[in-house]
Image (tube, rainbow, N blue to C red):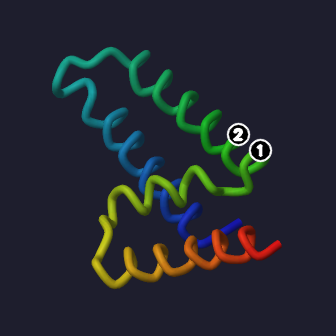
Amino acid sequence: MRQTSLNIIAISIFILTMSALLGPIFNISPLIPAIATFSVMVLVTIDTLGWQGQGSMIIVDLVEGTSSERRERVIRHEAGHFLVAYLL
C-alpha cells in the first residue's frame, strides 16, 4: 500500500473519530459517524483491492492542485504516447 493511501486513511480515521467524540456536544446522532466510517472503509477497500490505490492518487492530485511544471511534464509524456502510437 502506498504512503499516500495510508495518510488518507489516517486522516479519515482521525476526522471520523473526532466527529464521534464531538458529536454529542453538537447534538449529532451517533449513526452519522458510524455510517460515514463504514462508507469510508468500504471505499478505501475498493480502492486498494480493485484499483490498486489509484483513487487515492486522484484525490491527492485534486487537493494538491497542478503546477505549470507538472502540467508540462504530463503534456510531454502524453505526447510521447501519441507519437509512439502514430509511428506504430
For residue 56, side relative to residue 16 (left or right): right
**Which residue reaches farthest left?**
26
Tell me the kind of residue under disc 1: Gly
Q: Nearer the viewer, residue 80 or 3?
A: 80
Residue 74 higher or lower than 60, as above or below? below
Give the residue displayed 62% in from the left and 44% down from the top: 44
Q: Amino acid at mark 2?
A: Ile
* Residue at the image point whose x is 71% and y is 66% from the top: 1
What residue is pinned by disc 2? 46
Along the viewing direction, whichever of 41 and 58 lies nearer the viewer: 58
Image vertical order of residue 48 relative to residue 67, above or below: above
Q: Position of residue 85 (x, y in %)?
A: 74, 68
Which label number is shown at residue 50? 1
> Is 27 displayed left or right of 55 in the figure?
left
Determine the image quadrant of residue 6.
bottom right
Marks 2 & 1, CB-CB < 8 Å contact? yes
The location of residue 86, given as percent across then percent down, is: 71, 69
